[in-house]
Image: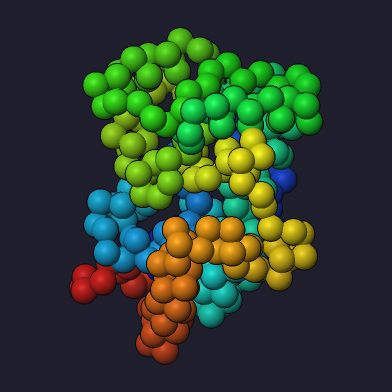
Amino acid sequence: MNQIPLFGLKIEDTTLADASANIVNDARSGVQRKIIYFVNAHCINIAAVDIDYLSVLQDGATLFADGSGMRLAARLAGFSLKDNVNGTDLFPVICHDAAAAGVKLALLGARPGVAERCAEKMKIQSPKLDVAWIHDGYFKQDTEDDIIDAINRSGAEILFVAMGVPMQELWIARHVNKLNVAVVLGVGALFDFYSGAMPRAPQWMRRLGLEWLFRYMMEPRRMFVRYVVGNPVFIIRTLWRCLKGQKNLQEAALLDGKK
């Protein structure tokens, strides 16, 4: 995979198919643990004001560009991304490849029952899929060691953590050294989509880069700040850095006010 510099982050430039193949191969080999995060416009806005989250993104994780906002920023920085490698579209490809390779999955996050329904639906698509362990995201901090021990005992080689940004990334960073899992991914609301708890945008909206608009229409109160406020802030941040030069957009420190 090739990397492109964007907002001071190293973004992988690849396709959904190649990303999945590499993830499953890494899970099978288990030679080196891989941490994967998906970075969209909302993530960039959070990283611009949250140094802990920014540090996690910069600490050796594999980063994929998610959404039309990142595609626009990449284009302004002088790059053309091969694909929109977002977690929601990548998940069924990983499930298919993992089932074929005999790689076990673990799902952690979302409301009670959601991850179970997600696993059931994915097993219909890929009957040989082995989801070795499932738990919702509503657990107390003093039970985290038990959660981690259960994940390790399950034999899962790929762990999907769905807690939302930046909670899931910070949780992974705190516990990654205790996990005996080859690949760990932070996947946001992914389980909600594949369980049927939340509908996805129609294909035509996704092709036009308008999935954010569909999500806003589904949850206008919860998504108002993220999209109605956040999207213009991201565009202004991107254009401001672009006006200062493509190199600035590629390599500048992301944190607001950081020199």
Q: Check the image and tell me how it is coloured.
A: rainbow
- Determine the residue located farthest toward the bottom in the rendered image: 243
In the rendered image, residue 113, in percent from the top left (x then y), is placed at 55, 27
Q: Which of the image's four quarters has the C terminus?
A: bottom left
The structure residue drawn at horizontal position 66% and vertical position 18%, both measured from the top left corner, is 130
Image check: 39 left or right of 67?
left
Residue at 77 percent of width and 65 percent of height: 204
Q: Position of residue 60 (x, y in %)?
A: 38, 46
Q: Is residue 43 visible?
A: yes
Q: Is residue 74 above or below residue 125?
A: below
Q: Nearer the viewer, residue 93 or 63?
A: 93
Point 38% across, 19% down: residue: 147
Q: Is residue 89 left or right of residue 3?
A: right
Q: Nearer the viewer, residue 90 or 216?
A: 216
Q: Is residue 92 left or right of residue 151?
A: right
Residue at the far top in the pictured view: 153
Q: Position of residue 45 (x, y in %)?
A: 37, 66
For this view, does 143 lie left or right of residue 92? Answer: left
Judge whether residue 245 can be spotted in this image: no
Q: Nearer the viewer, residue 183 or 141?
A: 141
Q: Residue furthest front?
A: 221
Q: How many marks?
A: 0
Q: Quadrant of residue 75?
A: bottom right
Q: Where in the figure is residue 105, as x and y percent of width and height? A: 58, 24
- The residue lying at 70 percent from left, 62 percent from top is 206
Give the quadrant of residue 117: top right
